[in-house]
Image (tube, rainbow, N blue to C red):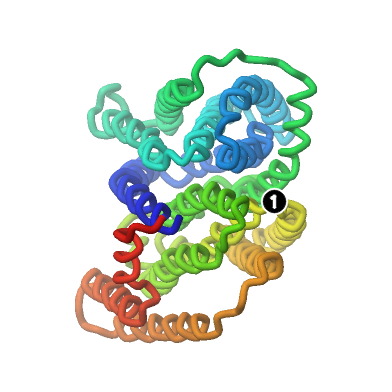
């Protein structure tokens, strides 16, 4: 199983590194620079509003389905016939509730127009993720890896024509960005649907109230967890836009600070997508998971530590390279959000393990507490510190929820504490801090200093065997699974 994890992770990372950096820094960043912080903040707050109620679209079905198809692949056709009907019912409910709530909090017609497309986009994303959960549940990881970048590849093509091809003959508008996403998501969903239907064979859509009620009852804990986590991960931009007079601008500043953390967090999400079906199958077969936990944790947390401290020491230079406006303000927010990423990596590993094991009650209590902490801190800090206050709230929330999940997983699986590994990680972190401090004192261009800092940190990680290339090589090329 470890070999399967490494080989499929390598493919997944390769494809995503091929496509998503250009999307984030070539397209998404360019759009913000072209339209400005106010217009992008207008879009960004609406986008996050559409995400908060996204749980209604899914109700935990994708995680539930991934876990169950990984254990019982023969049920694919039966699940598909019923769940597709349920997804469309939930889509109607999501649209009605989202638009009604938007009217209630006072969104104008311009905002409602854009929100309508964003709501439809969320349905397409949710539906394609559900369809992909069948593919990963069947252990078709290579196919799922290629599908994971299809939407972004299509958006790169469409947005490139709009940004640099001047096909419409006028200045780029934020609305075009949303329309391009709609076309890409719709195309991707249709492709994935075709592949899943080929694997499932002939299906007959069914509306079986009793069966759907059973599914909803079983997925409700998953849905609650998704709602709570989506809320404390997305509510900040809505609060910024609603609380502050210059809320759209502050949301735009937060968005540009979040762009790199959001990009690297994406790779944690990819880890989780691979690990969930693997953990589910290993737990069902009563196989030990601690080695896979240690392997996956080190593979993601070591780069997270390097990138976080590198971002702290070179925050102003990095933001200045990417953006034209609000560099000084966004650089401090960016550094805090990168430290949040370290804790998010822990969530992606241990939260996924607990989800695979069915510890939803503990996870929901943790997430509800995290949401309460996040909302309280945002209301206290936003009026005084604006976007920076929201970044502090995020860092506190992510650290609390990550450590809570680590504690719960250790109790549930009775992991032995590896004090030697903890000490090695602590010394490595200290070395990273010292190298960062020394690098900024050197009289060279910051790009050379930053590159040298990253390279030396990686060398130390290999020398201390926190990342053991020889062991990974043996693992991939051994005959054992």
Question: Residue 334's spot in the image, x, y percent?
Answer: 46, 63
Q: Quadrant of the C terminus?
A: bottom left
Question: Residue 245's spot in the image, x, y percent?
Answer: 62, 49
Q: Residue at x 69, y 44 (%)?
A: 222
Is 371 located above or below residue 328 in the figure? above
Relative placement, left or right, of 214 versus 479 is: right
Question: Residue 193's spot in the image, x, y percent?
Answer: 47, 23
Asked which quadrant contains residue 141, the reply is: top left
Question: Residue 238's spot in the image, x, y percent?
Answer: 63, 45
* Residue indicated by mark 1: 358
Q: Nearer the viewer, residue 100 or 413?
A: 413
Asked which quadrant contains residue 393, the reply is: bottom right
Relative placement, left or right, of 173 versus 404 is: left
Is 479 located above or below residue 51 in the figure? below
Q: Residue at x 61, y 20 (%)?
A: 81
Q: Nearer the viewer, residue 324 or 94?
A: 94
Is 80 located above or below residue 419 in the figure? above
Instruction: Specify the farthest residue to the front.
Output: 479
From this viewpoint, is residue 299 visible?
Answer: yes
Is 421 located above or below residue 158 in the figure? below
Q: Residue at x 62, y 72 (%)?
A: 415
Q: Secondary structure at mark 1?
A: loop
Q: Nearer the viewer, residue 327 or 160?
A: 160
Asked which quadrant contains residue 440, the reply is: bottom left
Q: Quadrant of the N terminus?
A: bottom left
Q: Nearer the viewer, residue 352 or 32?
A: 352
Q: Residue at x 35, y 77 (%)?
A: 461
Residue density around tag 1, few if under 14, some if 14–19, many if 20 or more, within 10 Å: some
From this viewpoint, is residue 110 visible?
Answer: no
Q: How many marks?
A: 1
């Amino acid at each position: 199983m470890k070999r399967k994890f490494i080989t499929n992770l390598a493919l997944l990372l390769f494809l995503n590194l091929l496509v998503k950096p250009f999307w984030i820094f070539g397209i998404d960043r360019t759009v913000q620079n072209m339209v400005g912080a106010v217009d992008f903040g207008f879009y960004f707050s609406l986008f996050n509003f559409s995400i908060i109620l996204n749980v209604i679209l899914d109700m935990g079905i994708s995680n539930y389905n991934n876990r169950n198809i990984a254990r019982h692949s023969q049920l694919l056709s039966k699940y598909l016939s019923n769940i597709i009907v349920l997804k469309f019912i939930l889509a109607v409910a999501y649209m009605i509730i989202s638009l009604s709530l938007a009217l209630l909090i006072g969104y104008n017609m311009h905002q409602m127009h854009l929100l309508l497309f964003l709501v439809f986009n969320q349905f397409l994303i949710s539906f394609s993720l559900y369809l992909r959960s069948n593919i990963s549940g069947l252990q078709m990881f290579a196919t799922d890896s290629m599908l994971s970048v299809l939407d972004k590849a299509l958006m790169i093509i469409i947005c490139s024509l709009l940004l640099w091809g001047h096909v419409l003959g006028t200045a780029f508008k934020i609305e075009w960005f949303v329309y391009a996403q709609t076309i890409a998501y719709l195309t991707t969903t249709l492709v994935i649907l075709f592949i899943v239907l080929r694997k499932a064979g002939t299906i007959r859509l069914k509306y079986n109230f009793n069966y759907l009620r059973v599914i909803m009852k079983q997925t409700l804990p998953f849905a609650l967890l998704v709602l709570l986590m989506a809320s404390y991960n997305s509510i900040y931009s809505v609060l910024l836009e609603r609380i502050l007079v210059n809320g759209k601008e502050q949301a735009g500043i937060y968005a540009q600070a979040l762009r790199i953390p959001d990009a690297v967090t994406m790779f944690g999400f990819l880890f989780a997508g691979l690990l969930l079906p693997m953990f589910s199958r290993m737990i069902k077969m009563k196989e030990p998971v601690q080695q896979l936990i240690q392997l996956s944790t080190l593979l993601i947390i070591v780069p997270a530590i390097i990138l976080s401290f590198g971002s702290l020491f070179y925050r102003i230079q990095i933001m200045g390279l990417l953006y034209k406006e609000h560099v000084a303000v966004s650089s401090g927010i960016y550094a805090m959000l990168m430290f949040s990423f370290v804790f998010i990596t822990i969530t992606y590993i241990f939260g996924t393990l607990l989800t695979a094991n069915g510890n939803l009650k503990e996870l929901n209590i943790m997430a509800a507490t995290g949401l309460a902490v996040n909302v309280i801190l945002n209301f206290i800090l936003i009026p005084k510190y604006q976007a920076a206050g929201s970044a502090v709230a995020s860092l506190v929330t992510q650290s609390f929820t990550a450590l809570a999940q680590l504690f719960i997983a250790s109790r549930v699986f009775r992991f032995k504490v590896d004090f030697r590994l903890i000490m090695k990680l602590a010394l490595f972190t200290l070395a990273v801090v010292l190298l960062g401090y020394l690098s900024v004192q050197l009289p060279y261009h910051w790009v050379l200093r930053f590159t040298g800092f990253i390279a030396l940190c990686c060398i130390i990680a290999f020398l201390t065997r926190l990342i053991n290339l020889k062991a990974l090589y043996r693992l991939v090329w051994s005959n054992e699974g």
